[in-house]
Image (tube, rainbow, N blue to C red):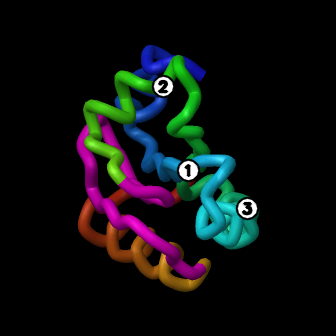
Amino acid sequence: MTTTDFDKIIWRDALTFVDFFATWCGPCQMMHPAIDKFQREMNGRVDVYKVDIDDRGMLDAVHRYNIMSVPTLMFFRRGEVLWRESGLASYDHLVNVLRELEKREQVAQR
């Protein structure tokens, strides 16, 4: 993925969840099962992407969003950051955040 691809993804009307991670990051590896489950279970409500901060093609996005620690988790819609959190988060926490965003954004479920 390149920053151009990333920009196209986050500027859509759909809610988009992005996990900024690193392959060398232990907490990031611990998060992947929860994020994979979130992607499976919330399919159709939110699009889920994982971005490796060490991917040279993503350096502009990593700098633009000031990713200083991993994992950093973000929800976007139409290019706007709706929610951001760094560190470990449970599947249930991610589902609760999504529910709150859907209420706030009045996003129709597909």
* Badge 3 or badge 2: first in the primary sequence: 3
Which residue reaches farthest front? Answer: 24
* Badge 1 or badge 3: first in the primary sequence: 1
User: Label 2 is placed on what type of residue?
Assistant: Met
Q: Are marks 1 and 2 in contact (CB under 8 Å)?
A: no
Q: Which mark is residue 58?
A: 2
Magenta part of the chain? 69-90
Q: Which mark is residue 32?
A: none
Q: Which mark is residue 21?
A: 1
Residue 51 percent location from the top left of the image: 56, 39
Give the residue displayed 56% in from the left and 57% down from the top. 45
C-alpha distance separating marks 1 and 2:
12 Å
User: Label 3 is placed on what type of residue?
Assistant: Asp
Give the residue displayed 27% in from the left and 42% down from the top. 66
- Secondary element under disc 2, as helix, strand or loop, is helix
Q: Compared to 12, does 2 lie above or below?
A: above
- Characterize the local packing of mark 2: few (<14), some (14-19) or many (20 or more) Cα atoms within 10 angstroms: some
C-alpha distance separating marks 3 and 2:
21 Å
C-alpha distance separating marks 1 and 3:
13 Å
For disc 3, the marked residue is 36
Membership of 39 in magenta stretch: no
Residue 54 percent location from the top left of the image: 55, 33
Give the residue displayed 60% in from the left and 69% down from the top. 27
- Secondary element under disc 3, as helix, strand or loop, is helix
Towards the viewer: 25 or 60: 25
User: Which of pointers 3 and 2 indicates the residue nearer the eye?
Assistant: 2
The part of the image, by quadrant, that contains residue 90 is bottom right
